[in-house]
Image (tube, rainbow, N blue to C red):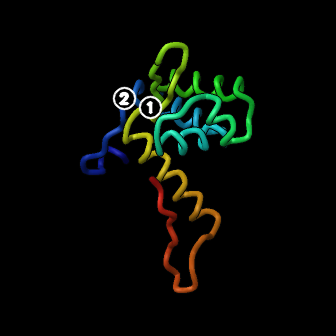
Amino acid sequence: MHDQIRDFEMPEDDAVQVAADAFRMLSDKNRIKILVALLQGESSVNCLAELIDASPSAVSQHLAKLRLAGLVNVRREGTFAYYVAANTHVKRLLDEALSHADHAAGHIDASGSHRHRART
């Protein structure tokens, strides 16, 4: 059946695994909040902890996982570490996920138009 679909392509298994790992990292609401914050600029663990109302150690653990998944980068300055979203792909991934959430939650205005929140 699929051989009858013109230009049908299945991605390579390693690419699918990387995508699955990225989605797994986005399965936690605090990680999503951390990424949203980091898309707006560089931040420290303590600042992120205050922002999402979590302990610095919990935020550190989230950041370590996000870094291993290639979703955030770290810059060290002396004893301080500053984190930032890895690239524009992270922004697009989050924009689409949050847009899907808006649709799933039924955020549609009276005219039937979709209301998308502006994201950075």
- At x 57%, y 85%, the residue is 110
Give the residue type at disc 2. Answer: Glu
In depth, the one of 80 and 94 nearer the eye is 80
Give the residue type at disc 1. Answer: Val
Q: Mark 1 points at which residue?
A: 16
Tell me the quarter of the picture where residue 14 sits: top left
Which disc is residue 12 wearing?
Answer: 2
In depth, the one of 33 and 96 nearer the eye is 33
Give x and y (percent) for residue 9.
Answer: 31, 40
> Is 91 on the left-hand or right-hand side of 5?
right
- At x 50%, y 47%, the residue is 94
> Is 100 on the left-hand or right-hand side of 28?
left
**Vertical placement of residue 111 versus 50, above or below:** below
Label 2 Cα crowd, 10 Å radius (few <14 / some 14-19 / many 20+): few
Is label 2 in a helix, a strand or a loop? loop
Answer whether labels 2 and 1 touch (C-beta < 8 Å). Answer: yes
